[in-house]
Image (cartoon, grey):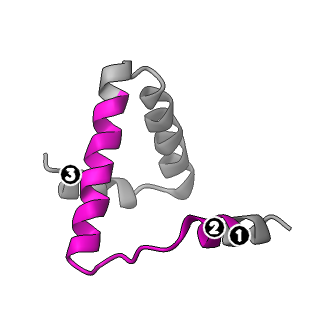
Amino acid sequence: MSFEELKAEALKMSPKSRADLAKELLISLDTLSDAEAEQLWIDEAIRRDDEIDRGIAQMRPADEVFKRARNRFK
């Protein structure tokens, strides 16, 4: 089953079942080795860099991002 097929099936589930599944999936990430976690971060960095190169995402100065984040918690 492909990722898209699995996602489509999961989205048919009740909200409670989806929440339970999400919880189990998040817990499963805690068992990753350091090497696996590092590879996931590398993959994410490559994905984000590609989005910037294709103009899908925009870069913002870190101070602006942190200011917006702090303002959300006020």
**Discs 1/3, front:** 1
Q: Which mark lies nearer to you, 3 or 2?
A: 2
| Magenta region | 37-66
Q: Is residue 49 magenta?
A: yes
Whether residue 20 is in magenta: the answer is: no
The amino acid type of the residue labelled 2 equals Asp
From the top left corner, tell me how far across and down residue 33 is, in percent: 36, 18
| Kind of residue at disc 1 | Lys
Dot 3 surroundings within 10 Å: few (below 14), some, or many (20 or more)?
few
Residue named by callout 3: 3
Mark identifier at residue 67: 1
Disc 3 from disc 2: Cα separation: 36 Å
Verify CB contact (< 8 Å) between mark 1 and mark 2.
yes
Which of the pair 4/64 is nearer the observer? 64
* Residue name at image x 43 percent, y 36 percent: 25
Residue at image location 39% in from the left, 77% down from the top: 58
Within the image, what quadrant is residue 7 found in? bottom left
Q: Nearer the viewer, mark 1 or mark 2?
A: 2
Q: Secondary structure at mark 2?
A: helix
| Distance Cα–Cα, label 1 vs label 3 | 36 Å
**Residues at discs 1 and 3 in contact (Cβ within 8 Å):** no
**Magenta stretch: helix, strand or loop mostly:** helix
Badge 2 crowding class, 10 Å Cα cut-off, few under 14, some 14 to 19, many 20 or more, is few
At label 3, which amino acid type do we have?
Phe
Mark 3 lies on a secondary structure that is helix
